[in-house]
Amino acid sequence: MSTFSGLPAHVLFVHFIVVLAPLTAILAILCAVWPAVRQRLVWLVLALSLVVTVLTPLTTDAGEWLEDRVGHSPLVNDHAELGDTMIYFALALLVAAVLLAVVHVSAARGRSVSTVLAVAVAVFVVVAGVATIVQVYRIGDSGAKATWGQIA
């Protein structure tokens, strides 16, 4: 999809990523460190991480279409290169959500999860979540600079 009602689709899709990726990361981190939250929100986190993973390539594809229309500049190229990395962060967030769901299901079935495994999952979720938030910021900042110019 390249346009939607005359607007570049990238402009629309990017807002979903900017909101959903950090929101999902924050909820995943809460699920990792707070079992009561995990019990209530783990399936929502899994669904949101799947949505982010599906929307990410749609957003980057729409961005490549837009890049061909606006022309190439160093700022646009930087933004495009950073944007292409987002799929790795979305996939890490999806893996983190799957691991949270596995821990949740194991606990719900009365199977004890080893402390080492629980801590490893929590650390992975926190690292993936923080990295995702930071990368969304970096990509968004580079996109703003590419759109509005370098602001001193």
Image: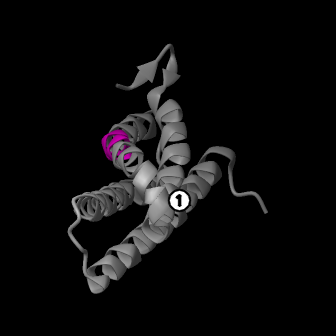
Q: Is residue 134 visible?
A: yes
Q: Residue furthest front?
A: 110
Whether residue 105 sits left or right of residue 85 in the image: it is left
Displayed quadrant of residue 104: bottom left
Which residue in the structure is indicated by mark 1?
A: 26
Q: Is residue 73 visible?
A: no
Label 1: how many residues lie within 10 Å, few (<14), some (14-19) or many (20+)?
Answer: some
The secondary structure that most of the magenta stretch takes on is helix
Displayed quadrant of residue 48: top left
Q: Is residue 66 above or below residue 118?
A: above
Q: Residue furthest bottom?
A: 116
Q: Which residue is pictured at 40% across the width and 39% down the height? A: 59
Whole-percent x, y for residue 111 in the image: 20, 68
The answer to which of 51 and 29 lies nearer the viewer is 29
Whole-percent x, y for residue 55 in the image: 36, 39
Q: Which residue is pictured at 24% across the width and 61% down the height? A: 102
Q: Which residue is pictured at 41% across the width and 44% down the height? A: 44
At label 1, the amino acid type is Ile
Whether residue 46 sits left or right of residue 79 in the image: it is left
Which of the image's four quarters has the N terminus? top left
Q: How is the image coloured?
A: one colour
Q: Is residue 136 magenta?
A: no
In the image, the segment drawn in magenta is: 50-56
- Count of marks overlaid on the render: 1
Whole-percent x, y for residue 60 in the image: 37, 44
Whole-percent x, y for residue 81 in the image: 40, 58
Disc 1 is placed on an element classified as helix
